[in-house]
Amino acid sequence: MSELTCFRDDNPDHPIEQTTDFSRIRELLAAQGIRLEQWAAEQPVAAGALQDDVLEAYRSDIDRLMAADGYVTVDVVSMHPEHPDKAAVREKFLAEHTHSEDEVRFFVDGEGLFTLHLGDRVFEVLCQKGELISVPANTPHWFDMGPNPSFVAIRLFNNPEGWVANFTGSDIASRFSRLSN
């Protein structure tokens, strides 16, 4: 189940709003231009499934987004607590950054914390299994997979080169919550 916590960007210790109501989360994020959806697999996907099996299980949703929004590349990323580079991979996403394209992630399994810096507000969105988040191009944000990451996510890109970050240089991400798994 998703969870959303909203703060003023100058007050990370006092949430303005917290909710686990998916409809409310989707409403609050949609008002900011953020897409949040829930998907169900057309066929079961077992832990450790191969990329092709994961993509096939969600083919109709993937094809719908690719056709509607012009995504040209799709892949699957999988992280587990024993991954030898988990600390370095985690660190790469923890600083505030933007992308020149949308950042689209669907959580096949596990969870991750997307934090969005929108005007004078910070929205922490805990995305979990079965949930898709689409962060529009040029939106300042950061992502935390936690110290012991355990997730499988489908990623869609407009850019065939995949994930390219433009770091803002702000230290705001260091003042907000981290995922502790």
Image (spheres, rainbow, N blue to C red):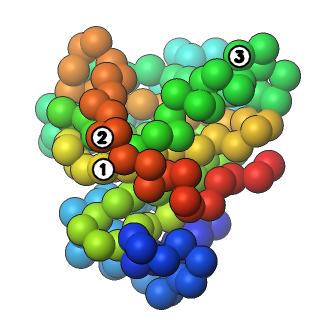
Give how far apart the Cα atoms at labels 3 and 2 are.
Answer: 24 Å
The N terminus: image quadrant: bottom right
Going by the numbered disc 1, the residue's amino acid type is: Pro
Q: Give whichever of discs 3 and 2 has the lower sequence position.
A: 3
Left or right relative to 75: residue 112: right
Question: Where residue 168 is drawn, which disc sits there?
Answer: 2
Going by the numbered disc 3, the residue's amino acid type is: Asp
- Examine the rendered structure and indicate whether residue 46 appears above or below residue 114: above
Determine if residue 23 is in view: no
Identity of the residue drawn at 46% across and 40% down: 95
Q: Which residue position holds label 1?
A: 140
Secondary structure, mark 3, is loop
Where residue 66 sits: x, y (%)? Answer: 23, 33
Q: Which residue position holds label 3?
A: 85
Going by the numbered disc 2, the residue's amino acid type is: Thr
Left or right relative to 22: residue 50: right
Q: Give whichever of discs 2 and 1 has the lower sequence position.
A: 1
> Crowdedness of circle 1 by 10 Å Cα count: few (<14), some, many (20+)?
many
> Crowdedness of circle 2 by 10 Å Cα count: few (<14), some, many (20+)?
few
Secondary structure, mark 2, is loop
Pointer 1 with pointer 3, Cβ within 8 A: no
Q: Closest to the observer: 94 or 29?
A: 94
Identity of the residue drawn at 39% across and 70% down: 9
Give how far apart the Cα atoms at labels 2 and 1 are.
Answer: 8 Å
Give how far apart the Cα atoms at labels 1 and 3 are.
Answer: 25 Å
Identity of the residue drawn at 71% across and 26% down: 87
Identity of the residue drawn at 55% across and 51% down: 174
Pair 3/2: label in front:
2
Q: Give whichever of discs 1 and 3 has the lower sequence position.
A: 3
Secondary structure, mark 1, is loop
Pointer 2 with pointer 1, Cβ within 8 A: yes
